[in-house]
């Protein structure tokens, strides 16, 4: 029997009020279905609600990190910067929720405590910590790829008496670092963004670095009227062109091999890419991501940039990565490296033992204690599976999703998992998701799911579920192509390597958006080939 008095019956429940959930709700409503969103947060925005640390900014250009489903929305919204800062993204998604009157079906501050499939009546029974539970035919997880914080289990952390922050759970009120001794652990995208901001205010900042990152200069700038007018006049064409690129980004890039030109020509081209800003460095040549020699040329180029930015040779050396560029996600920064020239910033490389322990007043590395007032963990996420694995989800025969995924996530197309009928994952593992521009990728999944649900309704079909063989084939195909890429070779969060004990499986689909879209469309044309349609 349910603990709660009320169980709301729905056609569809969407878990998560980020970009995926918001559009899914809009779509389901448009189909005349009863649908709601639940989210544990006190506001909408998903990852952009939580990651409100100083300096938080998207590394995709604002005018393309936006929905495309409504032309009027496209035309009316004015972005102010090339790369949008977190407050502006949050404002945008709130605007969308209001514009399409979505709030009345969004239940916030509600934590989903379990999701169990009832085979008898083909419904998902979703319990929450709120005043009501849900009984729903379709359960759609829009829980995000980078939403579950990775908080390392540092010895003695509970003894530390200073303030502790995590970039992905940043407080709503301003955190004042002035006059403080601050320690930041983590130099991935979040660390790269917050470190220069803290350095401006703190009495002293110590950055604890386990692995240095390749940081391309973002060259962020205000968007002028001409930028906006041009893009808005050509949105359709530009978005269609982006769909044809590997990651759904606007920059198609140069197809040439970096090894097909002289070293000097190569440098000139990389310099052009660098100056273009953002990810253009990586698309300066077509094979930086998959040819080790070409990759080395790009690595050398960035290491030179580091030496130019940081005159102190020992610091520059510590900041210089040795792994393949692009193997871990490349970071976008604004004067990141030069922060280490400041007198109030120290870079501490973590040795073999990493952070050895916390004391009441600081942390011990390489046997010596650094005293700090505040700790900022920029230690990332239990990516792609963390948000799902933290909710007990039980499908057919009461099998748990964690059990089904114990050797790594197994899905068909990243959309469904065998044994979990009518249970969809927006940008789930096994789909291009984090290797692509998330906004068009989210829209693609939402539209696929909506079309699928519509088909089931029209045909009077009770359940849809991934076929086991199709799922196995898809996972094998994903692993095979991933294993041939350079991305497979380093300990990134794509592989789950940042979370101790997590199975090492390359989680996103690395075959590119065009091939993936084609496959998803072909499956539909063939009557949902690879899915079992029951009843
Ligand atoms: P991340 O890339 O996983 O970086 C986490 C950092 O913490 C790494 O430097 C990692 O070192 C370090 N770390 C983790 N556990 C540690 C431990 N036990 N001891 C010491 N160091 C430890 O996480 P993130 O920076 O939050 O970024 C994650 C992803 O979110 C990005 O790749 C990007 O996709 C997205 N993101 C994007 C933006 C943007 O749009 N600009 C901003 C923030 C985040 P190792 O490298 O050695 O593991």
Image (spheres, rainbow, N blue to C red):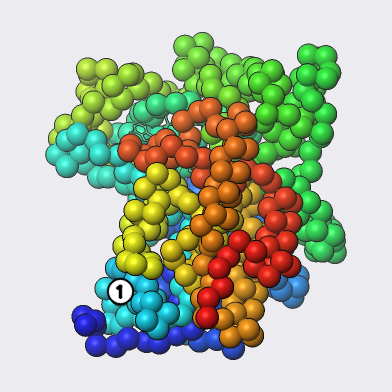
- Image coordinates of residue 174 in percent, x first then y, are 38, 54
Location of the N terminus (image quadrant): bottom left
28 or 61, nearer to the observer: 28
Residue at x-position 38% and y-position 68%: 396
170 or 182, nearer to the observer: 170
Give the total of numbered labels: 1
Q: Is residue 93 above or below residue 381?
A: below
Is residue 305 rendered to the left or right of residue 429? right
Q: Quadrant of ligand 1?
A: top left
Residue at x-position 61% and y-position 61%: 530
- Image coordinates of residue 428 in percent, x first then y, are 52, 56
Can residue 235 be seen at all in this image of the molecule? yes
234 or 119, nearer to the observer: 119
Q: Give the structural element (helix, strand or loop) at label 1.
A: strand
Residue linked to disc 1:
128
* Badge 1 density bin: few <14, some 14–19, many ≥20, Cα 10 Å: some
Asked whether mark 1 lies closer than 8 Å to ligand 1, one says no
Is residue 270 rendered to the left or right of residue 450? right
**Residue sitting farthest toward the top:** 313
- Image coordinates of residue 240 in percent, x first then y, are 80, 58
Residue at x-position 48% and y-position 51%: 410
522 or 313, nearer to the observer: 522
Residue at x-position 63% and y-position 84%: 459
Q: Is residue 276 above or below residue 50?
A: above
Q: Quadrant of residue 191?
A: top left
Can residue 201 be seen at all in this image of the molecule? no
Q: Is residue 169 above or below residue 202?
A: below
- Image coordinates of residue 286 in percent, x first then y, are 76, 32
């Amino acid at each position: 029997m349910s603990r709660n008095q009320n169980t709301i019956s729905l056609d569809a429940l969407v878990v998560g009020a980020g970009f995926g959930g918001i559009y899914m709700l809009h779509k389901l409503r448009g189909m005349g279905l009863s649908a709601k969103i639940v989210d544990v947060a006190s506001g909408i925005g998903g990852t952009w609600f939580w990651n409100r640390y100083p300096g938080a900014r998207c590394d995709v250009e604002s005018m393309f990190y936006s929905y495309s489903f409504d032309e009027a929305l496209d035309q009316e919204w004015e972005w102010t910067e090339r790369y949008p800062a977190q407050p502006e993204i949050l404002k945008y998604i709130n605007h969308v929720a209001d514009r399409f009157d979505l709030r009345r079906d969004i239940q916030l501050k509600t934590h989903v405590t379990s999701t169990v499939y009832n085979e008898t009546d083909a419904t998902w029974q979703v319990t929450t910590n709120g005043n009501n539970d849900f009984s729903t035919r379709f359960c759609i997880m829009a829980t995000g790829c980078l939403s579950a914080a990775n908080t390392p289990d540092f010895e003695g952390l509970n003894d530390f008496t200073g303030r502790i922050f995590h970039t992905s759970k940043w407080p709503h009120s301003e955190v004042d670092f002035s006059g403080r001794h601050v320690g930041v652990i983590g130099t991935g995208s979040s660390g790269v963004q917050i470190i220069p901001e803290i350095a401006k205010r703190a009495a002293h900042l110590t950055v604890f670095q386990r692995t240095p990152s390749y940081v391309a200069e973002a060259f962020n700038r205000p968007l002028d009227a001409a930028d906006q007018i041009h893009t808005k006049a050509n949105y359709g064409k530009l978005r269609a062109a982006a769909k044809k690129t590997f990651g759904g980004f606007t920059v198609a890039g140069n197809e040439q091999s970096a090894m097909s030109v002289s070293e000097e020509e190569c440098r000139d081209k990389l310099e052009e890419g660098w100056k273009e800003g953002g990810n253009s460095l990586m698309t300066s040549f077509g094979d930086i991501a998959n040819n080790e020699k070409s990759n080395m040329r790009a690595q050398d180029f960035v290491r030179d940039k580091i030496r130019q930015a940081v005159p102190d040779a020992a610091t520059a050396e510590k900041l210089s990565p040795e792994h393949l560029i692009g193997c871990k996600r490349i970071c976008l920064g604004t004067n990141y490296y030069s922060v280490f020239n400041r007198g109030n910033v120290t870079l501490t490389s973590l040795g073999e033992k990493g952070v050895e322990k916390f004391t009441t007043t600081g942390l011990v590395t390489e046997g010596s204690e650094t005293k700090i007032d505040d700790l900022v963990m920029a230690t990332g996420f239990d990516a792609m599976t963390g948000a799902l694995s933290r909710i007990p989800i039980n499908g057919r025969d009461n099998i748990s999703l964690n059990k089904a995924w114990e050797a790594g996530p197994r899905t068909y197309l990243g959309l469904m998992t065998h044994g979990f009928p009518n249970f969809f994952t927006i940008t789930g593992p096994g789909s291009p998701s984090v290797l692509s521009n998330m906004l068009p990728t989210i829209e693609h999944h939402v539209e696929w799911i909506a079309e699928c649900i519509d088909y089931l309704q029209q045909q009077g079909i009770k359940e849809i579920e991934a076929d086991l063989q199709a799922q196995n084939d898809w996972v094998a195909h994903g692993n095979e192509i991933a294993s041939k890429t350079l991305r497979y070779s380093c300990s990134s969060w794509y592989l789950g390597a940042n979370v101790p004990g997590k199975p090492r499986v390359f989680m996103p689909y690395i075959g590119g958006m065009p091939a993936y879209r084609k496959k998803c469309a072909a499956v539909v044309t063939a009557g949902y080939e690879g899915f079992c349609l029951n009843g």
